[in-house]
Each structure stands twice: as C-alpha cells, then as structure tokens.
Amino acid sequence: MKVGYVAPASISIVNGGIRTQANMTIDYIKAFGVDSIRLSPWDKNVDWSGLDLIHVFGATAENSGIIPRLSDLAAPIVLSPIFFSRRSAKIIRLSVSFENLISFMGNGIRSDFSLKSELCNLADRLLPNTNKEAQLIEMGFKVPSSKIKVVPNGVEKRFSEANKSLFVEKYGLDEFILFAGQTNARRKNVIHLIKAACELNIPVVIIGTFGEDTYSRKCLELAHKAENIVLIDSLDHDSEMLSSAYAAAKVFILPSYYETPGIAALEAGLANTNIAITKYGGTKEYFGDHAFYLDPYSEHSIRESINQALVAKIDPALKTRILNNYTWEKVAEQTYEQYKEVLQ
C-alpha cells in the first residue's frame, strides 16, 4: 500500500501536536507494510497517480487549496480534521447554513466553520481524535456517520521508562509543577498559569520558548516578578532531558482553553506524573477519572487543580490506561485498518 501524506506547511516552524501526530503516524504505520511518502509542495516529481491513498492532517486554511485538488484524483482521501470548538453542533450547523445561503449573493468571505465543513465533506474518511470531535463534525458539518471513525492521538512508550536523575542533577529541582509546550500560543493559556503560580509555594517549571509578540512579553514580565517560576527554553521532543523533566515533576499542568487531548500530558502520565488539565476538548475521554480537571478561565480553578494533584498519590492506573489504549503502535494499527476499509 502506497500512501501520500500532506500536512500544513506551518508545522515546519511550529512544534505542536499536529506535527507530532503526523510524524508519528507516518513512522509507526510503516510496520504494517505501508510505503509512506511525505508530500511536499516543492516536489514536482511526485507521481500522484501511483498513490493508493492520501492522508491529510488538519482541516485547516492551509490545506483548503490542496484538498479540493486532491479530490479530483483517483486516490481516496483520509483526513484527520484535528478540530474542536466550544460552539455547539447546532450553532455550527446554523452558521454554515447561513453562510451557504448568503453565498448566492456573491459574498466572498468564508468563515472557519464553512471552510472546515467543505474539507470534511470532500474527504472519503475522517479520523477525529475524540468522540466529541466526531459528534461536532457529524452534526455540525452534516457529514455521514459512515465516513467517520475515531482514531485517538498517541504517545511513545519510551516515556514510561523516564528517569528523573538527569533533570534533578542539572536543575536541582524535584517534585515540582511542570508545563511544557508552546508557551507563546494563546490557546495554551500560559499567562493564567503564571498568574496562578505566583500564589503557590512550590517551584513551577515552564519549558518552552517565548516570542517577541505582546503576549509573550507580558508572560515574561509576570514570570520574572515571581520567585517560584523557572523558565527553560524548549527542549527537543526526543531529548532525554524532556523525559527526565516529566519524571521529576509531581504535577504536569495543561491549562489550555481546550485540548484533544494534549500529547504532552499523555507523555507526562506515562512518566508517572499527576495530571492537572483543562476540562474542555477531549481530555476526559483520554484521562477519565485519573486526572484533575480545571476551568482555564479561572485562576482559582487552576490553583485548585494543582493543589489537589500535589497532595494526591501517583495513580498507576493512568499509566496502565495510556499503555493499553494510546500508544503510537495502537494508533497506527487502527489507522491502517481504516486505510484497508477505505480501499475495499
């Protein structure tokens, strides 16, 4: 089976979940005999006619030009939408319907919902990461349920063997609160974490690189005023130091406005770290009763979830849950089964 893979160009500079999901899927699915080809807009020598299937990551504006073109090819399209909204499916559906109605009057403006709806309906198979995402797509974008199959996000098993020694020896910190991710992305809500952290009597380690934008500067200004916040530049995803940081922390905090589900939290969970995480998105589907959920709009809620996680014993059931359901080996197998079904 020869499969071509398409991802937004922005993943080359943004080390986020979509890049991890795409790269890991491509790498691990090779074990099932898939000939994986990363497709680049700069490569003019791709034999599109020789592909059995095309897998696209992200129902995004960046992919809005290529997916309609790909639909003209004989190869079916599998799309991982990576979509979430706080809006209800009813509101989304009404928004798309209204836009379709006024489009007859020549309005050239397109909403994000309308764009995603078109891309999802063009695909032959959709692989959302959560049941909630699947429901929003089915009901909000009017996509037949037969085209939708939930395939979860994944995590590398190596994090289950993480050792804290390396991080403790270098930074002299143990049993702290940890955030690791895109610190300059507003969705990650680092600014409210920093404000909440100022009232905690425990070190808060933030791993990530801030930019030169206004949001980053405000985060840094607040962080530098706090005596208990330790800033560390982004660590490579494959670095042993990142794994060690997970193992050394008592609590991993992800106060995002939503997550589906937050790959870093899965990694930390495998390293036997308690998880405090946003209640919005698909987090409860992944972590169940083995995490402490917070309201990202409330600094009080962020602090409370951290305090609850700090006093709680490490829950070995979380590690077992992740290993049984969310390793990249299992994700690749489920993805491969969908490929076979689409090609039948």
Image (cartoon, rainbow, N blue to C red):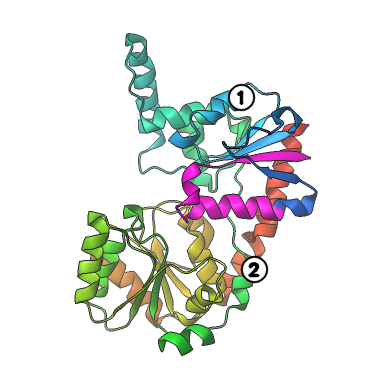
Residue at disc 1, secondary structure: loop
The answer to if 194 sits in the magenta stretch is no
Q: Position of residue 243 (x, y in %)?
A: 54, 74
Disc number for residue 179: none
Up-down relation of residue 211 to residue 96 (above or below)? below
The residue under the point 59% across, 58% down is: 154
Q: Position of residue 161 (x, y in %)?
A: 62, 78
All told, the count of numbered labels is: 2
The kind of residue tagged 1 is Ser
Q: Name the residue carrying label 1.
A: 71
Q: How many angstroms separate mark 1 from mark 2 (CA)?
A: 36 Å
- Displayed quadrant of residue 148: top right
The kind of residue tagged 2 is Lys
Disc number for residue 157: 2
Between disc 1 and disc 2, the foreground one is: 1
Q: Position of residue 209 (x, y in %)?
A: 37, 64
Decide which of tag 1 and tag 2 comes sooner along the chain: 1
Q: Nearer the viewer, residue 195 or 135?
A: 195
Q: Nearer the viewer, residue 313 or 296?
A: 296
Q: Position of residue 43 (x, y in %)?
A: 62, 37
The residue under the point 27% across, 83% down is: 201
Magenta stretch bounds: 1-28
Q: In the rendered view of the protein, which quadrant contains the N terminus?
A: top right
Q: Nearer the viewer, residue 281 or 158?
A: 158
192 relative to 316 in the view: left or right: left
- Displayed quadrant of residue 87: top left
Q: In the rendered view of the protein, which quadrant contains the C terminus?
A: top right
Q: Residues within 10 Å of mark 2 (few under 14, many from 20)?
A: some
From this viewpoint, is residue 237 visible? yes
